Image (tube, rainbow, N blue to C red):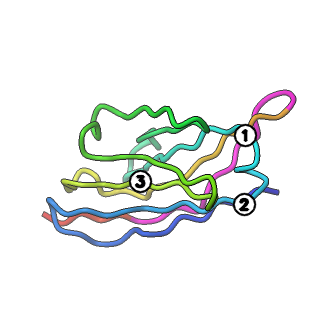
Amino acid sequence: QGQLVESGGGLVQAGGSLRLSCAGSRNIFSRFNVMAWYRQAPGKQRELVAVIATGGSTNYADSVKGRFTISRDNAKNTVYLQMTSLQPEDTAVYFCRADVSVLGPPQVYWGQGTQVTVSS
């Protein structure tokens, strides 16, 4: 079984920065995978924030382009989300997700989430 554990959330003032980390188990990072950060604000649906493939290609939601950066360190089995110029609307629980290539449909893993709160 794969496992993802997020950390780095907290309370920050508008305009501040945070770096989230997502540590994954070896059986996730040893295979070709796509790692992503999602977020879910109260009363809203979970939405994709950023995605990074094993080779390093990235994609971002329009709302975070230019402010957030996703990166990965495969040697440490960890994915990061550097968040800058944070705004109150970025307040949400942030989740890490892994889609791991296997024979057949990808195996999908989720972390437990980490709370990010941005005060105005």
Tell me the residue at 49%/69% (across/down): 7
Q: Any mark on residue 81, and which? A: 3
Tell me the residue at 60%/65% (across/down): 5
Could you give the CA–CA distance between mark 1 and mark 2, rounded to whole angstroms?
12 Å
Labels 1 and 2: the sequence-earlier one:
2
* Residue numbers of the magenta segment: 103-115
Q: Residue furthest bottom?
A: 11
The residue under label 2 is which amino acid type?
Answer: Ser
The residue under label 1 is which amino acid type?
Answer: Val
Circle 2: element type: loop
Residue 43, placed above or below residue 103: below
Left or right: 20, with 13 as reference point? right
- The residue indicated by pointer 1 is 100
Local packing at callout 2 (Cα closer than 10 Å; few below 14, some 14-19, many 20+) is: some
Residue 92, placed above or below residue 45: below
- The residue indicated by pointer 2 is 25
Residue 115 position, x and y percent, is 41, 65
Q: Along the line of sight, which residue is nearer the eye, 95 or 34? A: 34
Left or right: 4, with 38 as reference point? right
Tell me the residue at 79%/29% (across/down): 105
